[in-house]
Image: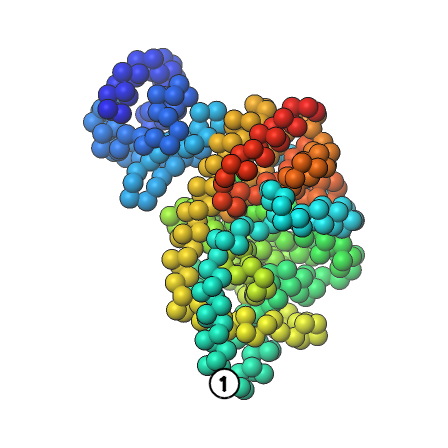
Amino acid sequence: MKAERLVKYRRISPAHLNQDKMKRYEKFADEVAELIRRGVLAPGEKVPSVRHASRTYGISPSTVFQAYYLLEDRGLIVARARSGYFVREHAQRPLHEPEIARRQAETTDVDVSELVFSVLDSLKDPDTVPFGSAFPSPDLFPLPRLARSMAQSIRDMPAQEIIADMTGGNGHLRRQLALRYMVSGVMLPPGELVITNGAMEALNLCLQAVTSPGDLVAIEAPAFYATLQVLERLKLKAVEIPVHPREGMDLEALADSLARLPIKACWCMSNLQNPLGASMSEDRKRALYELLHTHQVPLIEDDVYAELYFDNQPPKPVKSFDRDGLVMHCSSFSKCLAPGYRVGWVAGGRFAERIGRLKLMTTISPSVPAQAAIADYLQHGGYDRHLRKLRHALEAQQDAMLASAARHFPASTRVTRPSGGYFLWFEFPETVDSLQLFQQALAQGISLAPGPIFSATRRFANCARLNYGYPWNTRSEQAMELLGRMLRSF
């Protein structure tokens, strides 16, 4: 039936009326996009199989695959394992993607904590719709299974290990982490891993290892607000580098800044960047490493969302291209397995010993029981099975929020379409003040993260980050509808 509809509507498709220079897969992609726009292929409906489309159009299966890949990039269809391709729920009126704002980077003193704390304090009410939260729903995590792992591991732990694990970290956990690095193509020396109190401690220690007060640090713009707070606390200056919503950090702008300014470190999320959700391609990751290697500027790679990818293959870190220990790779289990356990780590490269010593001078050790529990779960609890279930839930929730935004927000709204994670970055009409929107929404029991908290220079006044990491329900839909009415009032 779907193949018959393709034939029926083929004559009216604009791809057959113009553009002889277009490639065949682009023409076919435009025809399918037109059917989606007209509602012939409805949201949630399966698109014709590769075999049927190939027969109907007289094109090769590889051409159909290329067209479907292009439609995926446009956010119109989505692949489901062993089921085929389906029209995305929001595809009837997709919102456009934000555009990168290019400007020459200058040094900036960081003073954002009061603004950030005023926003975070307002998010503590459990009755608030948690679009402004920094975490996904705790219901998505196997907390009872983790509790059993903790009980088992503590019961079986030799007394001497409790003391021994307080320095370098739990040996079983370090081995499990090293195995996961090995699978991703990164062979770590035994002493390179340092277990930390979450990723934030790892990132703090990395900055302290390679900078002094007053130094310049290249960061993303927009950047996760905690990045700005760390720089503020350590009295470091920010050099904001624009981030493309799909391609990640602007390497041309970074190269210009490295040539002009005495930058001492670069802090970057190469995978599923917070707040945009951008992921750099492998070529761009390699280029980033080579650029920093040329200038001998250390990279602090913040990779806390890497396990939350929606694609078939896990993304590689920049660390996988590191040949001389210049990259400090930081992550944690807070976003993908165990929020509240506060177990993170850093693969510190040439700086590992310095990072370890700084840790001993501050917090000494993360919770030994928490480390042991996670080590046991990684070995016996079905971590990868949990991750597959988590990714599926997050992808469905992203579709739901995008569909809702397309229904309720102004048509000129722009939004990212990340290939993982649980955040969407919205760019509203220029008349919108997201700090005012934040206050108005909070008064109605809806939280959001306003754009200015993601910039050292208080940019992105008409932007906001929304969290789709909670199961979608009627309350979520009503909140989006109410936000839409607020946006139209500006």
Q: Position of residue 28 (x, y in %)?
A: 33, 24
Numbered disc 1: secondary structure:
loop
Of residues 61 and 455, the one nearer the viewer is 455
What residue is shown at x 78% (from left), y 49% (from top)? 114
Of residues 147 and 423, the one nearer the viewer is 147
Of residues 294 and 125, the one nearer the viewer is 125
What residue is shown at x 34% (from left), y 13% (from top)? 12
Q: Residues within 10 Å of mark 1 (few under 14, many from 20)?
A: few
Seen in the picture, residue 45 relative to 332 is either above or below; the reply is above
Image label count: 1
Q: Position of residue 317 (x, y in %)?
A: 50, 55
What residue is shown at x 49% (from left), y 72% (from top)? 150
Residue 104 seen: no
What residue is shown at x 75% (from left), y 62% (from top)? 212
Q: Which residue is mark 1?
A: 158
Q: Position of residue 407 (x, y in %)?
A: 52, 26
Seen in the picture, residue 414 relative to 184 is either above or below; the reply is above
Q: Amino acid at mark 1?
A: Pro
